[in-house]
Amino acid sequence: MRPIDSTLSIVDVGHGNCAVLVDTAGVVVIDAGPGTALLEFLEQEGIAKVDVVLISHADKDHIGGLVALISSQRYEVDVIRINSDALKDSKLWDDLLFSLNKAFFAGAVQFNVSLTVADSGRFDRGDVHIEILAPDLYIAGRGPGSTDRDGRRLTSNSVSAVIRLIKDQTPIALLTGDLDEVGLDNLINNNLDCRAPVLVFPHHGGRPGMADTTAFTKRLVDLVQPETVIFSVRRGGQNNNPRPDIVRAVRESLPNVRVACTQLSKRCAANVPANQPTHLVDKYADGRQTNGCCGGTFVINLSEDNRPLFPVLQDHAEFIHANAETALCEEPLN
Amino acid sequence: MALVLSGTNIERVGVVDDSEDTRDTISDELQDAQLEPAPFDGPFGTLNDLIGTVAAAADAVVCDHHLSPRNYAPCTGAEAVANWYANRFPAVLVTRYEKAEIEEIRKFRRSIPSLIPSDEANPDTIVKGLQTCIEEFKGLFIPPRKPWPNMFRVDDIDVNANPVQVYVVVPGWQPSEAIRLTLDMFPEALREHVKPDERFFAVMNMGAETQEDLYFDNIEYRGK
């Protein structure tokens, strides 16, 4: 019998985050960006059951798809973990908690408001070890709205879960949610090994709170030492990520790094290509319909020893070269 | 003159509009699309008369939303298109796309795959609209039309409006956008629950790009 192909997909959900780990013994979703992208992705992959959903924090671009997933009643969802967030007074957050609470009492889902370093390994569903690097118990216990030991205010982003995936003792990817400077300091202070070949950059390449953006970026990539940095972004809209200073800081810190965005930023190309790009992987991507993808959905094949990342660098680079006249990832560095 | 759209042969296309000028215009567009127009002068005495007459004489139809002002037909185009859709007869609705029209149309929107603004009715949009409709009959939905069961919350209600307006939010779609429905879209037995912060469940096209295109079908009450 052919072994199951294990994959980690960084799904193009537009402005938001979503990763889907298909492992040998189950499916784990990490963050659920807005709209129906996650639903479409699962449907296209023929996935009917999600074993675990881990949500980094309570922002709408990380939870919107979970409301849709739970309400859709098309998918069986076993375990859902998220941290409580007293700062979040949004109706969406209330809608999500309402849905999850109902599902819990109906016996449909194991839902709990806790996702901390103490949960490392608890959600493994096959060969991949799911390591929770943040928040630690102190920060999670204090919670958004309070302060850290240095008296700095903890926001929702400060307590964002940071998740590292490891297979056969080798790191695969680091998913950082919307980690901000306080969260990064916490990560560094705990002396945790955060290295990973693929870094999904926090906050979609937007401003990391009040921090010096360049300094924050350099500290982060120095900690992670990635070969590829992925920005999960939407073309257009009010965010217009990733920020040029962040991309520049990444490339200055790691001259050989591959910078890759899910969608084609307007900063990089005024127009989308006239024709459907041919380099994209054959998986759902939010930008595909409008030819708005840059890398689209990224996939790491975990069944192969070298864990290749798709779309492959050469095809993606050719696309960028041909279609992104002001590509931030190709901008000359001084 | 004929086209094969998603495996379905379309030759004669009915043109339903209370204005002779508009019937002529749409007929020209159909001819440009290599289709044979079949304009209907009306009037039609009943909805069933309209539905049956057109279905018997054509393979598909392009229908205007406003049919009653000149006593052309005793129904709206939206109602007619929804009936054709239920009978698996390809139909495209043409509308001026005004806000008031959108509310009127929304209660039938689940069964109206193709809504074309009047000034955008041309061979390309009409053919594409018919194709979208035919594909839905086969269970193939374009992403903006695909049905997903989902939750919505009542944000506000205006009982002084006629008809009563209900403002709702669909958290899994655009959590910051209020969508205006009319109370009569809710099943009668559920209307007593239509109050702020009450939550309902419906089949919706969660991939819709604008709120004008959103439909709400099979509404159920979920609680507070």
Image (cartoon, rainbow, N blue to C red):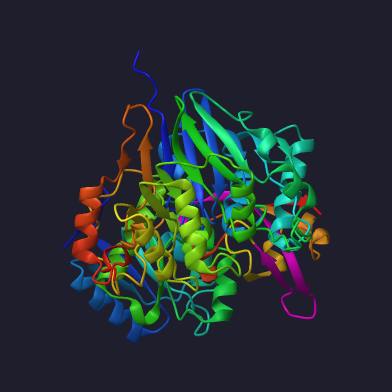
* Image location (x, y in percent) of residue B111: 50, 58
Instruction: Spot the residue most to the left.
Output: B1
Against B119, residue A255 (above or below) is: above
Describe residue B180's horizontal placement relative to residue B110 as left or right. Answer: right
Describe residue A304's horizontal placement relative to residue A102 as left or right. Answer: left
Residue drawn at x 41%, y 55% is A286
Describe residue B145's horizontal placement relative to residue B39 as left or right. Answer: right
Residue drawn at x 80%, y 66% is B196
If the image is split into quadrants, where does the C terminus of chain A sit? bottom left
Residue A236 picture quarter: bottom left
Against A254, residue A135 (above or below) is: above
Q: Main secondary structure of the magenta part?
A: strand
If the image is split into quadrants, where does the N terminus of chain A sit? top left
Residue B18 picture quarter: bottom left
Residue B118 picture quarter: bottom left
Residue drawn at x 30%, y 77% is B26
Instruction: Please report the bounds of the magenta region as a residue range.
Output: B145-169
Residue drawn at x 29%, y 82% is B25
Q: Identify which residue, A16 or A78, lies in the foreground.
A: A16
Against B83, residue B164 (above or below) is: below
* Image location (x, y in percent) of residue B202: 64, 53
Question: Residue A32 colored magenta?
Answer: no
Question: Residue B161 colored magenta?
Answer: yes
